């Protein structure tokens, strides 16, 4: 009997899933549902559209014309409104009133921007930086000297900053009460270094004061000042797209809870990508890792399990790579350190170089690097392999820049 597969969400997880489904079930019926118009595109390409590095066609996930038709995948530009689930399958209600029956469903709907709880977020000239439509609205305003205010100073904001600065706009970034940019992926030392780098390139970073509202203009009103703007960008975080699962019995916490086979608490429904609360490689805990490589692997593993080829997911390594207007930073694993573990840091403030290594016994469990890309592969390799460092532990505590030497020596010793 031909199986019916439905995949909701056409991001990296959904696209890789339909490809893996077809590879492993040549006869199955596969439908890919996208809540946005057009062909599936990579959201991480939006900054490159804004700075003119690529056009919109360059953001497509698959460049070959007719890719999904060739795979025999039914591609629909529709929004899922509600999911019904039974013991062995169910149906999906779409926004045009039609329905899709499924034997196995994959939810790969990713996230949507979380708007700050202030009046005025719906005014003209106020946008998020999340979709191609957003990119078009932003690009229309990016002229030299234009006044752009970005509310939020986390990863999403960091990704967009380079594109904005490169167009010659006057950019102000509101970090808010946190008093620190990129605090979810960086220590105060590293954050301070990145802030000084931004300020040296003309970015105003505001780390104090409370945002009260947005007024027509647009203008941003804080308790300490008012900022006139040509464009206000909201970059205050994201939340998982899960409302259509209400009533299915799928358990939802930070995201959709899945087991090691990417299966939700409803046996016929799977989840992958930013919407899924999957296994963390370092800790074994179940968390949301909003990373494109993680999403892609989630999609592949989920597809194998959907077709009946059991494949446990071993977990993803928490990792962020950020280009902050030309200064590259990486964070890996448990970069805050582990209780009872040791940490070593080395900072060169004048040259904007920073290295932080975190250990648990003889193993490296986390790392941060700013401006030292040559160490990145070695850091990731030592963390991901869980190698015992032996004599190299003491050596790295004395000089963390020897991490490449340690990696090469330990790799050859195996």
Image (spheres, helix red, strand yellow):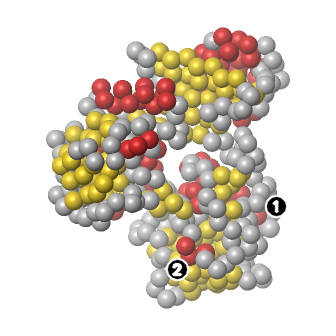
Residue nearest the viewer, comparing 362 with 412? 362
In the picture, the quarter occupied by the C terminus is: top right
Can residue 141 be seen here? The reply is no
Query: Which numbered tag is attached to residue 197?
Result: none
The residue drawn where x is 57% and y is 69% is 242
Q: Residues within 10 Å of mark 1 (few under 14, many from 20)?
A: some
Give the foreground label among 2 and 1.
2
Badge 2 or badge 1: first in the primary sequence: 2
Q: Residue furthest front?
A: 223
Dot 2 falls on a residue whose secondary structure is strand
Q: Is residue 39 above or below residue 180?
A: below
Q: Is residue 91 left or right of residue 171?
A: right
| Residue 117 location, quadrant | bottom left
- Which part of the image, by quadrant, shows the N terminus? bottom right
Residue 339 picture location, percent across and down: 72, 32
- Pick whichever, 334 or 325, lies toward us: 334
As drawn, 287 above or below 398: below
Disc 1 target residue: 310
* Residue 191 located left or right of residue 234: right
Residue at the bottom extreme? 97
Q: Calculate the distance from the C-alpha at mark 2 to the C-alpha at mark 1.
A: 30 Å
Label 1: which secondary element: loop
Q: Position of residue 403 (x, y in %)?
A: 65, 19
Q: Is residue 30 above or below residue 130?
A: below
* Residue at (73% x, 83% y) in the render: 86
Which residue is labeled 2 in the image?
81
Q: Quadrant of residue 356?
A: top right
Relative height, residue 354 to residue 175 (above, below): above
- 34 sits to left or right of 85: left
- Residue at x-position 73% and y-position 49%: 285
Disc 2, disc 1: CB below 8 Å?
no
Label 2: how many residues lie within 10 Å, few (<14), some (14-19) or many (20+)?
Answer: some
């Amino acid at each position: 009997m031909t199986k019916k597969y439905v995949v909701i969400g056409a991001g990296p997880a959904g696209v890789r899933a339909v490809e893996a489904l077809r590879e492993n079930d040549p006869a199955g019926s596969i439908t890919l549902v996208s809540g946005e118009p057009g062909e599936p595109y990579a959201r991480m390409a939006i900054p490159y559209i804004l700075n003119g590095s690529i056009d919109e066609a360059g953001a497509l996930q698959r460049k070959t014309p007719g890719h999904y038709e060739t795979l025999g995948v039914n591609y629909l530009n529709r929004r899922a409104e509600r999911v019904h689930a039974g013991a062995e399958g169910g149906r999906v209600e779409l926004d045009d009133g039609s329905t899709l029956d499924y034997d196995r469903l994959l939810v790969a709907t990713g996230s949507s921007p979380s708007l700050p709880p202030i009046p005025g977020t719906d005014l003209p000239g106020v946008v998020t930086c999340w979709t191609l439509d957003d990119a078009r609205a932003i690009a229309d305003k990016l002229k030299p000297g234009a006044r752009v205010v970005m509310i939020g100073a986390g990863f999403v904001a960091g990704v967009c900053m380079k594109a904005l600065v490169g167009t010659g706009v006057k950019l102000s970034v509101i970090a808010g009460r946190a008093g620190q940019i990129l605090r979810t992926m960086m220590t105060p030392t590293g954050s301070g270094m990145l802030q000084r780098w931004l300020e040296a390139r003309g970015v105003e970073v505001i780390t104090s004061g409370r945002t009260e509202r947005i007024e027509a203009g647009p203008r941003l009103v804080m308790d300490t000042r008012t900022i006139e703007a040509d464009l206000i960008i909201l970059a205050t975080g994201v939340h998982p797209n899960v409302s259509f699962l209400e009533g299915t019995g799928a358990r939802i916490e930070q995201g959709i809870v899945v087991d090691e086979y990417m299966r939700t608490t409803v046996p016929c429904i799977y989840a992958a990508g930013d919407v899924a609360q999957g296994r963390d490689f370092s800790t074994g805990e179940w968390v949301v890792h909003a990373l494109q490589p993680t999403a892609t692997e989630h999609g592949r593993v989920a597809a194998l399990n959907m077709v009946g080829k059991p494949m446990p997911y071993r977990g993803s390594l928490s990792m962020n790579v950020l280009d902050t207007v030309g200064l590259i930073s990486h964070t890996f694993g448990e970069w805050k350190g582990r209780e009872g573990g040791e940490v070593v840091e080395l900072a060169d403030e004048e040259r904007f170089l920073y290295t932080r290594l975190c250990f648990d016994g003889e193993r490296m469990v986390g790392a941060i690097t700013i401006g030292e890309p040559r160490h990145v592969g070695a850091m990731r390799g030592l963390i991901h392999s869980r190698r015992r460092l032996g004599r190299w532990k003491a050596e790295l505590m004395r000089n963390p820049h020897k991490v490449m030497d340690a990696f090469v020596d330990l790799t050859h010793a195996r």
